[in-house]
Image (spheres, coloured by chain):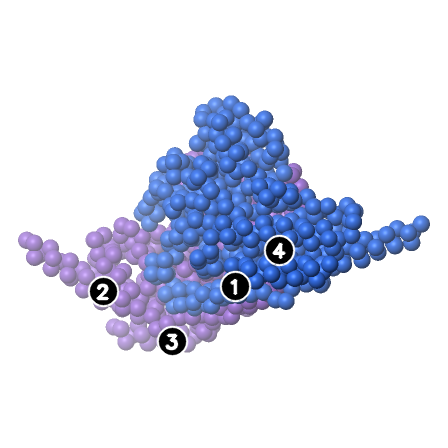
Chain colours: A blue, B purple
Amino acid sequence: MSETFAARAAALDTADELADLRKLFTLDDGVYLDGNSLGALPRHVPARMQEVLTREWGELRIRSWDESGWWTAPERIGDRIAPLVGAAAGQIVVGDSTSVNVFKAVVAASRLAPEGRDEILVDATTFPTDGYIAESAARMTGHRLVPVAPGDVPGAVGPRTAVALLNHVDFRTGRLHDLPGLTATVHAAGGLAVWDLCHSAGALPVGLDAHGVDLAVGCTYKYLNGGPGSPAYLYVAERHQAAFDSPLPGWTSHADPFAMDPGYAPADGSVRGRVGTPDILSMLALEAALDVWDGVTVDAVRAKSLALTDFFLECVGAYAPEGVVVPVTPQAHAERGSQVSLRCVDAGITEPVMRALIARGVVGDLRRPDVLRFGFTPLYVGFADVERAARVLGEVLSEVSGRALDGVLGEV
Amino acid sequence: MSETFAARAAALDTADELADLRKLFTLDDGVYLDGNSLGALPRHVPARMQEVLTREWGELRIRSWDESGWWTAPERIGDRIAPLVGAAAGQIVVGDSTSVNVFKAVVAASRLAPEGRDEILVDATTFPTDGYIAESAARMTGHRLVPVAPGDVPGAVGPRTAVALLNHVDFRTGRLHDLPGLTATVHAAGGLAVWDLCHSAGALPVGLDAHGVDLAVGCTYKYLNGGPGSPAYLYVAERHQAAFDSPLPGWTSHADPFAMDPGYAPADGSVRGRVGTPDILSMLALEAALDVWDGVTVDAVRAKSLALTDFFLECVGAYAPEGVVVPVTPQAHAERGSQVSLRCVDAGITEPVMRALIARGVVGDLRRPDVLRFGFTPLYVGFADVERAARVLGEVLSEVSGRALDGVLGEV
């Protein structure tokens, strides 16, 4: 069996037009399937950062705000991310964490919504920070927070809906939600749609402009490989920019920041989404990391991503012992992100399984209580990696579930 | 004249117990008096960042959240800053920009204040971001914003005062405000005092605990030399931590963040001031930069700072042509930060003067319309630097004001 899969993997790798991109990253002999948590290091970033540190900070110091382009980095890097999420230039600004950007987006969207609407819908299965921040935003703007399963959004939106905050891909299950359809549903009810792209940007087409998304946020340290905790971004559709009213109107979003005017007057365009002084070291590491996308299309990435996750599901189906894990990531391509989550039927084996996998060079992660997560970054994961990961997983599951059974029997 | 000052400078440098610290920084042949805007690069930071990039991100990747101490960096680095601002451990957390921390601090303080108080006082001469953010905080919490000159705070506080947001050192004039006295005044009125330490931390003693400050924020890229746009920090006095109610309750402030619980439950202690995923590259550069403080006392820094600014004012008095610039930084030590601001009597010469100074290797900056700013970082600025800066300034002022006069005469 493994010869067959290994041979298929080799053939798929040979035919993979993105295979050479792996050389752009620092990787080891293991299989890294945690790029949906922290993307691998693009090889050239350390050298670029040496230049930023020693030349731009060390020698030019304050002059670098102009001469090294520090001041304009948030918009410049936003424009680099824009084509990856289907946005025209001038609508994305980089800076702050995803959580802070969720706050900006939800509060600002609630102020853009028609008068009298008092509900903010939030994906009840969302990555928790979105829910926590949306709750704070609702409390501070006098809205009622309505948590709702994504499938129930169509029935939940209505004349009271100001904003719906939704995740494009569920962090736990890897389920891809219907961004075009749900955006249209929210719009039909007269509300605004805010999307969290953390688990989709860089892995699949988003189409922010094409689908009329109102605002969006996303992180850059997963499929965009920007580095640990690298700055997030905020998208404000051009049609909303003139009325965008930020709850965090920091000085760098001012129309004339160096006037140091005691009165606030917002800048035009995406600059209005800024808050404080840009975090240059992290921001320029991200900018350099984005170089790996030169000449790469998101459509090609998506095609490979689906081929990788299809192949992984097939290999797991063949290698894993019967009835020990169950995929929770949808089979349908239209409902699948770039990750495969497997539920352990016996939740107690989840942690020992992931520990054993990591010890054997297959790095995924887990979400308590019972989900094994494997992320597939098409820029650096190949089909031989997939076959090996599934094979090692099969071995580990056999051993651990066998041991678990022994343990139970031993206590009889 | 210049021989006298030069000789005095040499003697002062010889006697300076902090003089050797300059070797820890990357500096050139010029005089860098803009450390109150962007601190110089500590020499060892690039090597440390190579390790962070290539080993911690590149090789360990996701394991570094535990194994390299990434996850606990915000509190760990907060505890490194704590002694520099007179705080016991466990009260400072690093992350986000100053502006975002002002929002957290002012909103949280307004929630800690006694019921029924409806005013937030803000220093009317403050760095503008504090005013902009305080206005947003007031709007979102139903308070009235009361801008007031710091000298008028005693008359402005009263039974309606919930919070006063004050700057320790004025960014424009370099005036040091009376933190102990004003904190006591605000407390006597029953309100909470929030201090912005951007222009004082690392330059002079702050005494947060000793003076009973309630909350405080500060940046780390000025006198703390953390790098361009490095993360800011939030101080919440221990007595307020249990009731600290953040407007930005992101997932990393949760009591059990990896439970990924849809319900928010805040962590205890300074962790509660966190928001999103910590920005590791910038944060670890800051951590490394703080090494230069090993064995250095803030009292020694303050003593040198006052000696530097005294000497600069004296040299400027001697070297500058009569009536062209006027110091706006107070003469009294108790009212002076670590910067000297000179107002140009003819505002029109401000920009040409600073351009000429920079061209001759003396780097300060300006604040429109008429203020020349010179910051003195005792860790790397010496007395010969001060004499040279004042001498070059005198030459430039003579030339520029002379030219300006010619221009006027030429038009007669």
Q: Quadrant of residue B114?
A: top right
Front residue of A268 and B13: A268
Q: In this rendering, would A225 be left or right of A56?
A: right
Instruction: Identify the residue at horizontal 76%, vertical 59% (top origin).
Output: A395
Contact? badges 3 and 2 (CB < 8 Å): no
Instruction: Identify the residue at horizontal 63%, vertical 56% (top origin).
Output: A33
- Please say if B156 is above or below B178: above
Judged by depth in the image, the label closer to the viewer, 3 or 4, is 4
Q: What kind of element bears circle 3?
A: helix
The amino acid beneath tag 2 is: Val
Q: What kind of element bears circle 1?
A: helix
The image position of residue B269, as x and y in percent, is 63, 48
Q: In this rendering, would B360 be left or right of A122?
A: left
Q: How far apart are the two marked residues, 3 and 1, measured between alpha carbons?
A: 63 Å
Residue beneath disc 3: B11
Judged by depth in the image, the label closer to the viewer, 3 or 2, is 2
Q: Are marks 3 and 4 on the same chain?
A: no
Q: Are marks 2 and 1 on the same chain?
A: no
The amino acid beneath tag 1 is: Asp
Judged by depth in the image, the label closer to the viewer, 2 or 4, is 4
Chain that bears disc 2: B
